[in-house]
Image (tube, rainbow, N blue to C red):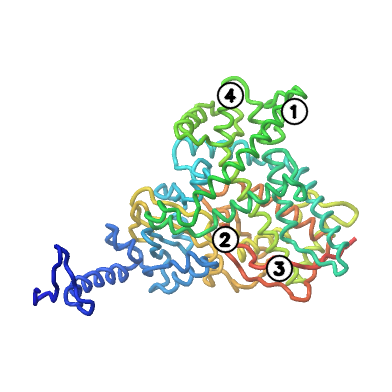
């Protein structure tokens, strides 16, 4: 027995008495000291392990904030807690370094800097092939080609205007469904979420595939289930994104669920492509031409000459092949297309991105607005008086009326300020190289976020920031398209949302239709404005209200 260690050896193994701490004390104390130092470093352990000598001020850990249902509020509180109310605060989640900007000037530095040109790709986003879509694709030739297609063809003013009859028709179908639901219930109560979501999904499906969404059909139920599964996967907190070992183990089953969903969507999209091809053969349509094609699949099938694609190419573009070499070849072929050609082309990752983001942005924003209309009958009455003056009651609202509905546009802006669908601008940025922001060094590999909710609720920028007051925008015209970082719900810079004009056109028209046709009132329980941040900031409890026809 070694008296110093208080231990003995048996068959070459060291045996320690159960009550002995002599051997472990120095080592344990050293490990605890190192761990404590890591946690005491501003920004936490991930920053302590970096080579950054001047990290932004921050808290050791914001796991509860980022994984909780109100991350935007928790991160705003974190920024305020840092000495001086840091415009740029740092924190750690596992081995991931984060910074969050809560001031317009710092936000502009992040959003306009080439250093933050990329996005971090979460395991779920990669599993759903979003790294091949414009939202997540790394900056480079492929991403620039996608952005050029979106900017020059998909979301141009001409295309948005050309889709007005579709928006109007889908809005009218939504109103008819609301009328039927109100008539079927003696109290006139309506659950708004499902109706708004179905209309939004119908709109996206019509735009992308030229097909109607029927939630009561088997195909519609399958589509809705796929979209819900995509929401859940993209919005969930995944430990594997922040701890490499857990990513490899996939304990939460994220990769397995993504593989299953990808297969389901692949079958769904292939069937729609086949339907378009058969219809083209029957009608002899040639696509392209001077007229805007009906949907994106029509465009793809109408490509001629150098742009004409084989079936395997089309599948690779609409839905990236699971073979990495095929993915590379498809990228090369895509980038080789003539830049002056008519190229309304997506890979299916981009289609998924449109379905997920396009559906929830419109539906969630409209639910928040209708909740405010129910809670503020004076604002509702003012918007309806404007509708009666501009439109009257003898006809339906049209896209052309929206320009004259100035107060209604202010209502939408105020909803985007108070209840932004993407309070953290939905997807974060990734530092591709070291950068200086707000006087601090942000090393490469850091995930950067903009807390647009905190900026839009800053009392130094907004009078009575927690009050819902659309009149503030009649006093000062503030753009929501990214020019003014006090209110940029769709982002700004090179990674701003490309579909923002289409989303706004849809929200303005459908809100006008809803207020023009019905008066809205609360039910007995009132309206609960509690929030839940999943993929977007939604009402925790779905809105239920009463609808009474106005005419």
Residue at the spot 82% in from the left edge and 50% down from the top edge: 172
Specify whether residue 494 is in view.
no
Tell me the quarter of the picture where residue 180 sits. bottom right
Q: Badge 4, how many Cα within 10 Å: few under 14, some, many 20+? A: few
Asked whether the beta carbons under mark 3 and mark 4 sit within 8 Å of each other, the answer is: no
Which residue in the structure is indicated by mark 2? 534
Vertical position of residue 428 compared to residue 334: above or below: below
* Mark 3 or 1: the one toward you: 1
Task: Give the mark nearest the N terminus, 4 or 2.
Answer: 4
Q: Badge 3, how many Cα within 10 Å: few under 14, some, many 20+? A: some
Task: Give the mark nearest the N terminus, 3 or 1.
Answer: 1
Q: Identify the disc placed on residue 372.
A: 3
Q: Nearer the viewer, residue 346 or 214?
A: 214
Task: Give the mark nearest the N terminus, 3 or 4.
Answer: 4
Q: Identify the disc placed on residue 310.
A: 4
Q: Quadrant of the C terminus?
A: bottom right
Vertical position of residue 17 compared to residue 146: above or below: below
Q: Nearer the viewer, residue 46 or 446?
A: 46
């Amino acid at each position: 027995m070694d008296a110093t260690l208080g231990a003995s050896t048996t068959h070459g193994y060291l045996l320690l008495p159960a009550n002995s701490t002599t051997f472990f004390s120095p080592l344990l104390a050293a490990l605890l000291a190192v761990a404590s130092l890591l946690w005491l470093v501003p920004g936490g352990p991930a920053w302590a392990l970096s080579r950054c000598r001047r990290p932004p001020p921050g808290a050791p850990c914001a796991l509860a904030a980022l994984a909780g249902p109100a991350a935007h509020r928790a991160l705003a509180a974190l920024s305020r807690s840092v000495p001086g109310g840091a415009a740029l605060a740092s924190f750690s989640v596992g081995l991931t370094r984060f910074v969050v900007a809560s001031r317009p000037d710092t936000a502009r530095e992040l959003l306009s800097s080439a250093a933050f040109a990329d996005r971090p790709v979460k395991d779920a986003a990669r599993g759903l092939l979003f790294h091949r879509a414009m939202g997540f694709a790394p900056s480079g030739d492929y991403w620039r080609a996608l952005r050029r297609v979106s900017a020059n063809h998909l979301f141009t003013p001409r295309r948005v205007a050309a889709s007005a009859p579709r928006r109007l028709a889908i809005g009218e179908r939504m109103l008819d469904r609301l009328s039927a639901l109100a008539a079927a219930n003696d109290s006139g109560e309506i659950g708004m979420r499902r109706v708004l979501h179905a209309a939004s999904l119908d709109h996206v499906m019509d735009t992308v595939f030229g097909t109607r969404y029927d939630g009561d059909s088997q195909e519609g139920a399958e589509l809705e289930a796929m979209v819900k599964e995509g929401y859940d996967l993209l919005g969930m907190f995944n430990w594997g994104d922040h701890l490499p070992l857990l990513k490899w183990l996939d304990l939460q089953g994220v990769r397995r669920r993504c593989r299953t969903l990808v297969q389901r969507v692949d079958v769904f999209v292939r069937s729609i492509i086949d339907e378009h091809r058969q219809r083209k053969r029957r009608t002899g349509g040639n696509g392209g031409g001077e007229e805007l094609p009906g949907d994106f699949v029509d465009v793809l099938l109408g490509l001629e000459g150098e742009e004409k694609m084989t079936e395997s190419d089309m599948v690779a573009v609409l839905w990236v092949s699971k073979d990495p070499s095929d993915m590379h070849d498809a990228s090369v072929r895509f980038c080789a297309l003539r830049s002056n050609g008519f190229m309304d082309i997506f890979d299916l990752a981009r289609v998924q991105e449109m379905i997920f983001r396009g559906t929830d942005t419109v539906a969630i924003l409209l639910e928040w607005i209708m909740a405010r209309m129910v809670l503020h009958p004076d604002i509702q009455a003012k918007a309806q008086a404007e509708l009666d003056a501009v439109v009257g009651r003898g006809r339906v609202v049209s896209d052309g009326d929206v320009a004259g509905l100035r107060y209604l546009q202010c209502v939408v802006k105020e909803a985007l300020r108070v209840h932004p669908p993407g309070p953290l601008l939905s997807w974060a940025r990734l530092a591709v190289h070291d950068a200086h922001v707000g006087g601090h060094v942000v090393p490469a590999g850091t995930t950067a976020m903009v807390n647009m909710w905190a900026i839009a609720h800053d009392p130094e920028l907004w009078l009575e920031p927690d009050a819902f007051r659309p009149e503030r925008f009649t006093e000062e015209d503030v753009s929501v398209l990214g020019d003014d970082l006090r209110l940029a719900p769709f982002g700004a810079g090179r990674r701003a949302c490309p579909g923002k004009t289409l989303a706004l056109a849809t929200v303005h028209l459908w809100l006008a239709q809803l207020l023009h046709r019905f008066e809205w009132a609360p039910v007995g329980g009132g309206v609960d404005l509690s929030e839940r941040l999943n993929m977007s900031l939604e009402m925790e409890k779905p809105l239920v209200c009463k609808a009474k026809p106005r005419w």
